[in-house]
Structures are given as C-alpha cells and as structure tokens.
Image: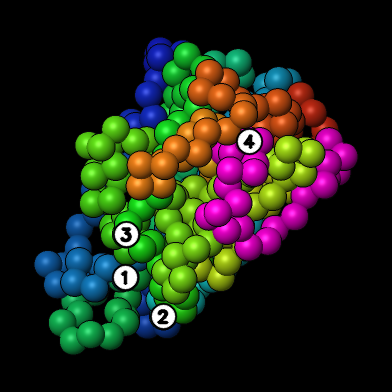
C-alpha cells in the first residue's frame, strides 16, 4: 500500500486523524461483533457514565515497520491483560484478550498507509480504550460501554537526541496504597495534570511521586515508571502495589538479564538512596527510556554521574537493544512480536 504524503522525519508526538478506527459496543451483557468505521466522532448522551464519574480505562502500544518491511506490534497480549485488569477494577466489562489482539491487527492493517517507514524514527501509536456510554446519574457503574481503538502516526519522543530530563520530587500524591494507581484509568492521569503543569512552570520536565503512606519511597511519574542503574551496573526498578505495571519496564528487565547479562531486580527504592545511583531513566511506550540527569528534592539537587548531555552507558544499551527487538534488527523472544 502506498504511504500517505507525510513528512515522517518531522512528525511531533501529537494526534493526526487516520482513516479507520475500531468500535465495539457492550449492551445487554455482551459485546457486539465490532466494526471498522471512518467516523472519528463519538456521540454519547450528556449524562453518560464516563462524563459523570470518569468510568474509563485505556491502553497505549505501537506498530512498527521492521528492517525487512514487515508491520508488527509489540506484546499486545500484555496490553490486553492490563486492560482487563483495569476494566475489572472499575466494574467495567472485560474486552476479551483474543478479540483485543485481533482488533489491534485489524485497525493497524486498515491504516497501513499511516505506518511510518523503517528508519524514519516515527511509529504508529495505538490507543485502545473503554468508557461507560449510557446515562448514569446515581453513583454506580454504567450498564453500556464502548470499546474503541484509534491510531495516529507519531514522531520520536526526542527531537535531536535524548537529552536528560530534570525532575522534581512532588508534594502531590499520585495514588493511595489501596487505590487505583496500579491500573491505567483516565482518572489517574487527570489528577496528575495540575502537578505536571506546575512542574513545567517551575522549570522541571516531570514529577517524581513518592508513596502516599510514608513519602519515603519512589513510585513513578505521571506517565512512566522509573528505572535506575547502580554504580556497579545493576538495573533496579521500584516495587509498589500502587504503580502501573509497565510493559516496557518488564521488557527492559528481561533484556537486561537475558540479552545484556546484567543483574536486575524490582524492589522498594527509598528517596534517600537516589544519590547512590549512577543512572536514572523513565520508561514507557512513548520513548522506551527517557534519561534523567537530575532530581531536585525541595532545593537539594541529586545529580547522576551519567550527566545532563546524553544517556548513561547502561541505559543506552537497554534502549538500543529493546528498540532493535521492536524494529526487527535484533531477534525477539518468542511471542513478543506480532506481525500484522
């Protein structure tokens, strides 16, 4: 299929409407068969559950053009599982895992002309989501829901190289110990908006949220998990029941152990031990790893030896290996790559 006339190399990370999206409706206790549609608009009642009580969950993954010209997605089964967990927590019907993966394949295939070419630095971002669609005025779960998948071509998260970020320790709490921090619900991101706007006003790129109970342990940012590297080369990520189980983070831990031969562990990480790490990064779908050069804790600067000019050496190896797997230049573990 002929590609769209898009300046792939200069794409930003924003929304560009593509030709098709997938839609399935839940009514009378069952999901319908689902369709591809060219209509990008969602029409719902003014009293829809999603508008009144924020009953919505979502996912994020990408489609890539590999070095040999195939179009693939990365571990969509894990996105399906996480969407199931998110939906269950908000008393929403689960969209079946096998149907999720098939829907992703269908919508990417239909928008093949928008999948950026290999080497452009761009990808096709895929956003599946579910929301309560029928009128709800009493505080209760909706009875009807809509599952949709939209796609949009996006540029690289970094322009002109991965410049390390400066992060502040936030005074705001992201999630309560027994709350919804471990699921991908819209409400978690809504509460982070004021904190990120305030951080930007103060000259910081992101927030570091601490555990709400003791405010002594590292959790995550508003949209990414943390990854640290010790001075002796061990990869460490925070362990908490109130942070999102990042698919990218889990993949990077596997890569560290199985591809790079590094020690890697998930454990509680305390704020007062940050000064002892050699490297720090934020990991997620958008950028794989965003390097962090400095963390500011109420005026006290914690500067990582990796510096403010480029990724640290271990972080860079992790980034290059995982992106190589995604782009087809490095052999992937069984089941990680799903061809369209």
Q: Nearer the viewer, residue 233 or 39?
A: 233
In the image, residue 255 lies in the stretch drawn in magenta: no
Q: Which residues are magenta?
A: 257-281
Q: Nearer the viewer, residue 11 or 276?
A: 276
Vertical comparison of 28 with 176: above or below? below
Name the quarter where the C terminus is drawn: top right
Q: Label 3 vs label 2: CA separation?
A: 27 Å
Q: Label 3 vs label 4: CA separation?
A: 25 Å
Report the residue that reaches farthest toward the front: 300
Vertical comparison of 1 with 35: above or below? above
Residue 273 visible in the picture: yes
Which tag is nearer the camera, tag 1 or tag 4? 4
**Residue lying at 36% horizontally and 77% vertically, measured from the top left:** 27
Find disc 3 in the rendering and name its residue. 172
**Residue lying at 77% horizontally and 49% vertically, measured from the top left:** 264
Find disc 2 in the rendering and name its residue. 91
Which tag is nearer the camera, tag 3 or tag 2? 3
Name the image quarter holding residue 38.
Answer: top left
Q: Earlier in the sequence, mark 3 or mark 4?
A: 3
Q: Earlier in the sequence, mark 2 or mark 1?
A: 1
Q: Are marks 2 and 1 in contact (CB under 8 Å)?
A: yes
Q: Label 4 vs label 2: CA separation?
A: 39 Å
Q: Secondary structure at mark 3?
A: loop
Q: Which mark is residue 279?
A: 4
In the image, residue 262 lies in the stretch drawn in magenta: yes
Q: Which mark is residue 115?
A: none
Q: Secondary structure at mark 1?
A: loop
Q: Which mark is residue 55?
A: 1
Vertical comparison of 334 with 29: above or below? above
């Amino acid at each position: 299929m002929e590609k769209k006339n898009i300046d792939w190399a200069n794409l930003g990370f924003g929304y560009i409407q593509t030709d098709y999206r997938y839609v399935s409706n839940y009514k009378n206790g069952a999901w319908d068969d689902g369709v591809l549609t060219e209509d990008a608009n969602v029409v719902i009642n003014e009293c829809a559950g999603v508008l009144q009580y924020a009953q919505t969950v979502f996912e994020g993954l990408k489609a890539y053009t590999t070095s040999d010209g195939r179009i693939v997605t990365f571990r969509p089964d894990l996105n399906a599982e996480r969407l199931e967990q998110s939906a269950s927590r908000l008393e929403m019907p689960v969209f079946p895992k096998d149907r999720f993966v098939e829907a992703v394949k269908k919508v990417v295939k239909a928008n093949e002309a928008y999948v950026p070419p290999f080497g452009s630095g761009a990808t096709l971002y895929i956003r599946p989501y579910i929301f309560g669609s029928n009128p709800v005025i009493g505080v209760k779960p909706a009875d009807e829901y809509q599952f949709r998948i939209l796609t949009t071509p996006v540029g690289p998260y970094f322009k002109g190289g991965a410049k390390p970020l400066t992060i502040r320790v936030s005074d705001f709490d992201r999630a309560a110990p027994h709350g919804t921090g471990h699921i991908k619900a819209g409400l978690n991101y809504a509460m982070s908006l004021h904190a990120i706007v305030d951080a930007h006003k103060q000259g910081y790129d992101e927030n570091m949220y601490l555990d709400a109970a003791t405010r002594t342990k590292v959790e995550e940012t508003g949209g990414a998990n943390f990854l640290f590297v010790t001075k002796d080369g061990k990869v460490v990520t925070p362990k908490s029941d109130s942070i999102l189980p990042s698919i990218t983070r889990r993949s990077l831990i596997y890569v560290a152990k199985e591809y790079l031969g590094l020690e890697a562990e998930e454990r509680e990480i305390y704020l007062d031990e940050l000064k002892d790490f050699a490297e720090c990064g934020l990991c997620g779908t958008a950028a794989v790893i965003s390097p962090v050069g400095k963390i500011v804790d109420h005026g006290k600067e914690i500067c990582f030896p990796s510096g403010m000019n480029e990724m640290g050496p271990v972080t860079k190896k992790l980034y290059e290996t995982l992106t190589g797997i995604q782009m087809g230049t490095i052999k992937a573990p069984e089941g990680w790559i799903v061809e369209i």
